[in-house]
Amino acid sequence: MVVIVDYGVGNLFSLKSSFKAIGVDAICSSDKEVIKSADKIILPGVGAFEDASYKLFSSGLAEVVINQAKKGVPLLGICLGMQLLFDKSYEYGEHKGLGLISGGIRPISDVLPKNLKIPHIGWNALSFTKKSKIFKYLNEGDCVYFVHSYYGANCLGSVSATTEYGATLTAAVENGNVYGCQFHPEKSGEVGLKILKAFCESEG
Amino acid sequence: MITKRIIPCLDVKNGRVVKGVNFEGLSDVSSPVELGKFYSDNGADELVFYDITASSDGRAIFTDILKEVASTIFIPLTVGGGINTLGDFDRVLKCGADKVSVNSGAIKNPNLIYEAAKRYGDQCVVLSADVKRVNGKFTVFAKGGRENTGMDALDWIKRGVDNGAGEIVLNSIDTDGVKGGFDIEMLSAVCDIVSVPVIASGGAGNIGHFVELFNTLPKVDAGLAASIFHFGEVSIKDLKQQLKLNGIPVRII
């Protein structure tokens, strides 16, 4: 069973519907026991890193997610959920992440030419930097939907896909059974559904 | 490279798409769910659903329809029409909308954009402005373009962005419905003063108008249209192929 971690951040309606569309049972839960029983875990999230990180750690859900990931349960972080997998974020200060992906979250304004709009919003193409199980149904150049102002930095070893927006930005990361997408698979049409399907088929 | 977005807009009244459409293969041409799926399957990058219902019963039907659309189509959905309070934001976001477009509601209550952006993030708040030249000055109109507010459009849009609007839909009343092309002059003036994405609306009559738009104004992020897509005058697939041939980055599915 796929469990979408519900820690009070963001709207889970589309995510839940997209699993239904690929014929996979997914439930949203904030119950530690339910999350412990999951064979796949989704960490969603939109909004500010500090608030989300606080909610995950103070509720004790961070510990459960970290432990399950370390036991080998496939974990997919989406958007802010991907950023939370990192060691830390520099969004308005310095805040602790789950430490499952080495690196830090930094503003894209650090690397973008001045004339580009922030956030990076819209459909952009993926370029794969390693062979990833979750992209097995995709082709180089497939477009996915991004909305973000921060990106994963200093994570070169974990980057599985990048996208070009005035600079090369981290689009996806991977470390063993831990996966992260900066974009929204649940808003990326057929291509996004193929990513979720491949993730559901991964064995960790 | 970020692609230019093509966005069909559907007006929904009492749960049905008004100004019904004319496509083969659709069993119910005024079902928002079927039409939404049709556009999504044909390469639309985003959908805008505009609720033009006046009654509260109609509003409840609209939110049910929205839920159904959002569980069928996995591309970004923007909802507008009748958005006056944070409660309205909450109502449509819970049904699967990704962005909420405000227009007259923000004119009546200038704090709405700020409050909504603070609660849901800038990326969620779209300021839609209906603008018309009055004595040579770009002026904001309310209530679907019927009421002259007397406000300077560039000031209004700038203020909206400062308050947290993450995108601008600029609808030129002067070019709307004329099918003579987008209002390049008006769009250019707006692009010069804001740093958030600008969506062009009003005036598209053929594929060439979109090519002209993106070639002349590289700062414009998206083109929005309704009737030319609904009546099959322009197919999104053909449009995107032509944009690609003209060197404009688009998502081809």
Image: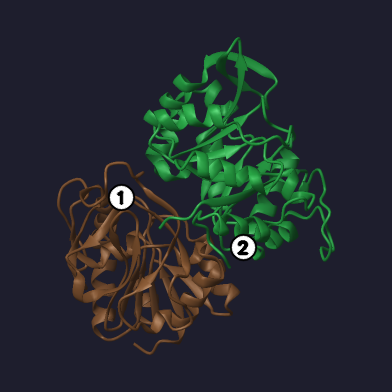
Q: How is the image coloured?
A: by chain
Which of the chains is brown? A
Q: Specify few, some or many for label 1: CA neighbours under 10 Å numbering under 14, 14-19, or 20 or more.
A: few
Q: Specify few, some or many for label 2: CA neighbours under 10 Å numbering under 14, 14-19, or 20 or more.
A: many
Tell me the chain of label 2. Answer: B
**Distance (Cα) linking label 2 and label 1:** 27 Å
Q: Residue at x 20, y 49 (%)?
A: A110
- Give SS at disc 1: loop
* Percent of width and height locating residue B2: 43, 55
Q: Residue at x 22, y 66 (%)?
A: A86
Residue positioned most to the front:
B246
Vertical placement of A65 versus B195: above or below? Answer: below
Pointers 2 and 1 in contact (CB under 8 A)?
no
Vertical placement of B130 versus B232: above or below? Answer: above
B57 relative position to A46: left or right:
right
Q: Residue at x 38, y 54 (%)?
A: A46
Residue B78 appears in the picture as rendered: yes
**Quadrant occupied by the C terminus of chain A:** bottom left
* Percent of width and height locating residue A179: 33, 75
Residue A194: assigned label = none
Between tags 2 and 1, which lies in front? 2
In the picture of the structure, the residue carrying the numbered disc 2 is: B73
- Give SS at disc 2: loop
Residue A48: assigned label = 1
Residue type at mark 2? Ile
Which of the chains is green? B
Tell me the chain of label 1. Answer: A
